[in-house]
Amino acid sequence: MMLEQDTGLSLAIAQIVQRLKGSSLHSQLERQARGSLHKPEIKLESLKEDIKDFLKTSGWEKRLQNAVYSELNVFPSPCHPAAPPEHMKEPLVYMRKAQGSWEKRILKSLNSMCTELSIPLARKRPIGEQKELFNKWNEMGTDEPDLSLFRPVYAPKDFLEVLMNLRNPNYENGDQPSFRNHLGLIQVPLKVKDIPELKDYFSELGLNTGQLGIDDSTQVPPELFENEHVRVGQTVLTEQDSAAAQQYVRQGCPTALRAELWALILNISNQPEDVKLTASNDDYYFVFEDYLYQVLLCFSRDTSVLEHFSYNSATPPKSYIRGKLGMEEYAVFYPPNGVIPFHGFSMYVAPLCFLYHEPSKLYQIFREMYVRFFFRLHSISSHPSGIVSLCLLFETLLQTHLPQLFYHLREIGAQPLRISFKWMVRAFSGYLATDQLLLLWDRILGYNSLEILAVLAAAVFAFRAVNLMEVTSLAAAEAVLADLSTLKVMPLLQIFLFATVT
């Protein structure tokens, strides 16, 4: 066992070193180390130790630590050396096949729309168009082409239908006794946490722990907790420690510190990135208002996003130059980032506009949030933060802890997942009030997990259980849950997790 752990650790270290070698941080560190050789305190006889000390005192060691921590958070543990590379993307064959079939369906829909509208999937913009786009960059949302002919490539409900049909061929009709009792829409046997495990995992959300977003905590007066929490947050920012920041936001972010703390957790430097030039030399894809337009236009053309496909069960769609079909050297990814957006995709960016007013920073934060978290909400995988596991966790929590409600809704044809799926697939963006949504996303970053989305979805049903027990149709159930904008996220989560009898 120890030998396996050592091998796994060695593989992880080798993988991280390899990835960091190609980063700008690596070249900056090299430059700093070379520059330090001219300093009088660096002695030849103790060169290695002196340079290490210099990197420590000048803050570069901390930056390296944050980069390593970021890699550990984003990339999965390396597979066994003998495992095929696709195992890193998704270990279960039937999940990979289902994802492949779904991608073909999306691509077919996209291609037929392009044929119908006589719009090329990819072409280089003429010089005149490039200049025009560059000049009107800050007024994009006011000068839109007519988008009425474009339809979304797919909507969340289309995706839910695919997930409902997922089956593991090795479990005919769910051979496991525990799984046979699952009466929800998701029919694949994945391991999800139960309430005791969730209580343990989300222990910092406990009733006796100070929280931002709880106004009437009996243990600690809110203003005392908030003042102390702000002071600790400022210290964390001064230290510039990603791991400490991640632990800190589990109890919520003070509004004034949130933008900087999230950037620290996501390891986004203060270096501006020119994201405008890459967008001006390709064809329009999907158009959004102002910041959203700028960010998503750049995102669709950002080829660095392709890197996340090494640990995403999805595969970027390929297009071939005319007449060269099937010849790999003539293949191009389209869109260039490999991500085809769905109806509501812009809602992953919208809340970030409240935190970041500088487009470059906004862009970098969104891209990092996407490649760490959001891609999992529209890819078919067995990952605990993947949408399949979230759906199963939601249904299991409801069936176990609110069985009467679950069976009632099921009997009237209002399967709860048909209502909650759109909340989870958009990470509740557009459904909660912005301040509440940001408190929820604090915890996604703090726990490096999307499981809290499923817990909150179940908590919403628990909160509205009395009204839901009276409905007699799916439409009536949807009406009860149509407006979530007045909900307070943290009390709901606390009551559901820590006041539920198990």
Image (cartoon, rainbow, N blue to C red):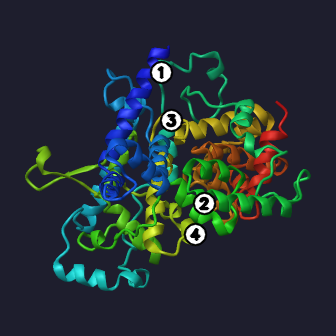
Tag 2: residue type?
Leu
Residue drawn at point x = 71 percent, y = 57 percent: 232
Residue drawn at point x = 40 percent, y = 41 percent: 312
What residue is shown with label 1? 5
User: Is 168 placed left or right of 149 in the picture?
Assistant: right
Tag 1 secondary structure: helix
Residue lying at the far left in this picture: please name it. Answer: 323
Expressed as whole percent of the image width and height from the top left, the position of residue 2 reads 49, 16
- Number of numbered discs: 4
Residue drawn at point x = 31 percent, y = 52 percent: 30
Closer to viewer: mark 2 or mark 1: 2
Evaluate if marks 3 and 4 touch, with contact meaning CB atoms under 8 Å apart.
Answer: no
Q: Residue 334 falls in which quadrant of the image?
A: bottom left
C-alpha separation, residue under disc 1 versus residue under disc 3: 21 Å
What residue is shown with label 2? 237
C-alpha separation, residue under disc 3 versus residue under disc 2: 31 Å
What residue is shown with label 4? 355
Tag 3: residue type?
His
**Mark 4, residues whose alpha carbon is within 10 Å: few (<14), some, or many (≥20)?**
some
Residue drawn at point x = 76 percent, y = 53 percent: 490
**Mark 1, residues whose alpha carbon is within 10 Å: few (<14), some, or many (≥20)?**
few
- Ranked by sequence position, the earlier of labels 1 and 3 is 1
What residue is shown with label 3? 383
Closer to viewer: mark 3 or mark 4: 4
Q: Nearer the viewer, residue 290 or 81?
A: 81
Expressed as whole percent of the image width and height from the top left, the position of residue 245 reads 61, 53
Q: Nearer the viewer, residue 467 or 495?
A: 495
C-alpha separation, residue under disc 3 versus residue under disc 4: 29 Å
Evaluate if marks 4 and 2 touch, with contact meaning CB atoms under 8 Å apart.
Answer: no
User: Is 147 placed left or right of 479 in the picture?
Assistant: left
Expressed as whole percent of the image width and height from the top left, the position of residue 485 reads 71, 64
